[in-house]
Every structure is written in structure tokens, then in C-alpha cells.
Amino acid sequence: MPLLVVGSVALDSVETPTDRRDNVLGGSAVFFSYAASYFTTVRLVGVVGEDWPDAHTQLLRQRSIDTEGLQVVPGKKTFRWRGKYLPNMNDRETLEVHLNVFGEFQPKLPDSYRACRYLFLANGSPRLQMSVLDQVPVPRLAVADTMDLWIREEREDLMRLLRRIDGLVLNDSEARLLTDEENLVRAGHLVRGMGPKFVVIKKGEHGAMFFSEHETYVLPAYPTEYVVDPTGAGDSFAGGMMGYLAARDDFSPKTLKESMAYGILVASFTVEDFSLNRLQRMERSDIDIRMEEYQRMLSF
């Protein structure tokens, strides 16, 4: 089944303890789309300025990502982010953020996108996310991401969003902030009580936790030896997870657990190079090989 994603499209400048890259392809919708494209067709909605290289659009189209929903605003600049990772590669400092066209983004879905049954609302204002929900009348599965900014500054709107979606993806610090609860197991259940049918808490190098009415579990990260750039790992995780669910057109407990594993594995590839460089060198068969290794790792 086609998968619709709405989110940021960006040009990133990334500095790590050993290297740096300037003006590389980034953004939540970009990482999500590319990861999901290994499982299903993806329709992307985002906005860029006239400084956006057409080569980036062509790169997405080569993965059969539908970019009809990518708006180009003449005379404006693309969203830009610059950050620096600390030596542990888990913590980072945001050095510059220029929202540019993304700060004024009002998504308008092409008519062909509105019938999509699988929808992912990548990180963005909850008001923007709800405006997308208003344009997709009958999604079979609607999942959203969020961040600390919206939890602090648009909490009321976020709470309204949570009552309208099926699933929420957030990281461990965001779950604690949203619930004022340090214990992640309690935090996960508290978030689920706010509306979503299931909640996924990302824990970076420690994997991810899943919460639903009927089960709670933790899946570990794949043991990646060389972490080059963690940017986009969380969005790649969500893309792998949602891509697998849309491809199967099923979100039974077994399929949800499989989708979590695939999300973890796609993210493990993303961190092995800057931007989409590692994913560009990857085939679906590479994911399946790593899945076999992952399953053996979890068997005892």
C-alpha cells in the first residue's frame, strides 16, 4: 500500500568528532521516505526554496518516491540545520537553525495523495500535523512523531493530536518530558493513555520500546561498530517501521514487532555514513541479511 509522509526537507551541515559535511541532503521526510522506499511506494509532502538542488529531487525519484507533493517556493530558501556531535555520538549541539520556507509551511495534499491509507506525520507543529489529518479522510493507520519544542510550547494542540492518531513515536527524553515520569515503562503507558493505540519510544543505541494495551517489549539496537553520523537515524527507524507495515497492509501484534525490527535495522545502516550515503549503497537484500543476523542475536 502507498505510504504518505509529511515533514521537513532540509539542507544539513553536520560536524562529528572526526569529520564534517556541509549542505547535505537532510530533513525528517527525506530520511523517512528513503528508508520506507525499501518496502513500499512513498508519497512525500514537503517544501523547499529555490536554492534546493534538483539533483536531490532526482535522487528521491530514483527510489520511486513520489515528489508531486514537494513544493518549491520561488525567491525563498530551504530549511537549514547545522549541528555538532559530541565525542559519545549520542549527544549533539544545534549550532544554527534557519526554518526559512518550512516556518511558513501549510501542506496542501495533491488529490492523488488524499486516499492514502497509511500516513506518517513527521516531526512538526501539531497544528500542522492536524491540518494534514483533516485532508486524509480515512487513514487506516496514522502515526506521528513529535519533539520537546512542541511538548513545551504547543502542549494543548499536541494533546488534541494524540486523541486523533493511532500511534506516536518519540524518544526517551521526550517521553519523560511529556509525562513528567522518569521510569520509561510508566511513561510509555501514560503516553498511550493520552490517546494513541500504541507508543514507540526510541532509545538510540539502546534500541526501542513498544507499548500497547496488550503488550510491552524492548528490542535492542543492532550492534553497529562504526557510527559515522547519527543524523536521521530516528526518522529512518520510523520509515523502516511504517514502510514494512504499509507493505504488509497489516498491523497485527506480530507484524508490529517485525516492523520495529526492520526500523531498527534500517537505522543501523543510516548511521554508518553521512546523510543518505549509506542507504544509497544498500539493497533490500542487505536489510534481509542483517535481519537474519539480528534474529540469531536474539535467539537463546
Image (cartoon, helix red, strand yellow):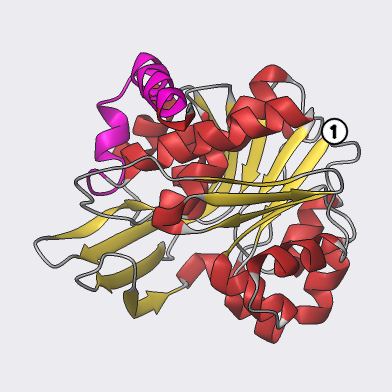
Could you say which is closer to the camera, residue 2 or residue 174? 174
Kind of residue at badge 1: Arg
Instruction: Name the magenta segment's main secondary structure.
Output: helix
- Can you see residue 116? no
- Residue at (42% x, 28% y) in the render: 294
Residue 157 percent location from the top left of the image: 81, 74
User: How many neighbours does mark 1 have within 10 angstroms: few (below 14), some (14-19), or many (20 or more)?
Assistant: some
Q: Report the residue that reaches farthest toward the top.
A: 285
* Residue 239 forms part of the magenta stretch: no
Point out the stretch of residues depicted in magenta.
272-296
- Can you see residue 6? yes
- Would you name the residue on which mark 1 appears? 140
Q: Is residue 184 above or below residue 107?
A: below
Residue 32 percent location from the top left of the image: 51, 42
* Residue 292 forms part of the magenta stretch: yes
- Residue at (55% x, 73% y) in the render: 173
Q: Is residue 238 above or below residue 118?
A: below
Q: Is residue 97 above or below residue 279?
A: below
- 226 left or right of 53 in image: left
**Quarter of the image holding residue 89?**
bottom left
